Each structure stands twice: as C-alpha cells, then as structure tokens.
C-alpha cells in the first residue's frame, strides 16, 4: 500500500519506487488516498443535499482522479489498484490525556 496525498498530484518517482518494490516481491500495489473535507461533512443550512450524499459524491470524484493516475501504470503490466476512503480527523483537547 502506498498512500498518496493527492489523487492526481503524486510524485511519479515515488510511485515508481513503490511499483518496483511491489514487483520485486511479486505483490500487488495499492495506491490509497484518505480524504476529509469539513465543508462536505457539515454543509451549511442551505445545502441542497444531505451529508451522506455529499460525502459519497466527493469520494467518487477522488476515486476517478486516482484511477486516471493508475491507468497508465497498468499499461506497463503493473498489478495495481486504487482506493479512496473517507476519514475524519480527531482533535485533541485539554480534557483528553
């Protein structure tokens, strides 16, 4: 598994290294992208869609972007897949120790 910060803007040399490592181990490479956007998770009171629908649409958009980056790599015979997951950040406060 190789985590990418941006589905369309990962550094090609880093992905190449991950691909070579996976090939050397005869393993499949998974490009993984975790997303969270507070604006999508908590839309304003004038939102025209519910939160779950907005999250689902956002995930699908990012998955399509990541797939566009993965597709040329498959053309070179790489065993590679992509996944996008929704994740919320946890904020520590003074009561949590």
Image (tube, rainbow, N blue to C red):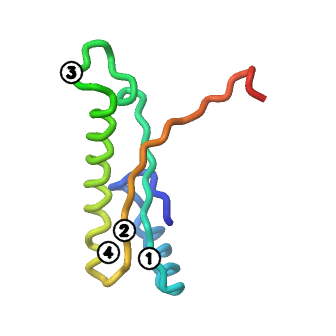
Image point (33%, 28%), residue name:
51
Q: Secondary structure at mark 1?
A: loop
Q: Relative to residue 41, is residue 72 depicted above or below?
A: below
Q: CA distance from mark 4 to mark 1?
A: 12 Å
Circles 1 and 2, Cβ within 8 Å, touching? The answer is yes
Circles 3 and 1, Cβ within 8 Å, touching? The answer is no
Q: Mark 4 highlights which residue? A: 73
Q: Relative to residue 42, is residue 69 depicted above or below?
A: below
Question: Which residue is most to the left?
Answer: 48
Image point (43%, 38%), residue name:
36
Circles 4 and 1, Cβ within 8 Å, touching? The answer is no
Question: Which residue is most to the top?
Answer: 45
**3 or 1: tag closer to the N-terminus:** 1
Q: Relative to residue 73, is residue 63 depicted above or below?
A: above
Report the mark closest to the observer, 4 or 1: 1
Q: Mark 1 highlights which residue? A: 28
Q: CA distance from mark 2 to mark 3?
A: 33 Å
Image point (30%, 63%), residue name:
69
**1 or 2: tag closer to the N-terminus:** 1
Q: Secondary structure at mark 4?
A: helix
Q: Mark 3 highlights which residue? A: 48
**4 or 1: tag closer to the N-terminus:** 1
**The image quarter in which residue 42 lies:** top left
**4 or 2: tag closer to the N-terminus:** 4
Badge 3: residue crowd in 10 Å (few <14, some 14–19, many ≥20):
few
Q: Relative to residue 53, is residue 60 depicted above or below?
A: below
Circles 2 and 3, Cβ within 8 Å, touching? The answer is no
Where in the figure is residue 46, as x and y percent of width and height?
25, 14
Report the mark closest to the observer, 4 or 2: 2
Q: Which mark is residue 81?
A: 2
Where in the figure is residue 25, as x and y percent of width and height?
53, 85
């Amino acid at each position: 598994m190789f985590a990418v910060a941006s589905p369309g803007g990962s550094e090609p040399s880093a992905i190449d290294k991950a691909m070579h490592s996976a090939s050397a181990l005869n393993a499949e490479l998974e490009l993984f992208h975790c997303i969270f956007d507070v604006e999508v998770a908590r839309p304003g009171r004038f939102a025209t869609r519910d939160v779950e629908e907005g999250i689902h649409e956002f995930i699908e958009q990012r998955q399509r972007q990541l797939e566009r980056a993965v597709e040329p790599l498959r053309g070179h015979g790489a065993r590679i897949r992509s996944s996008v997951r929704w994740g919320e950040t946890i904020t520590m406060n003074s009561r949590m120790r």
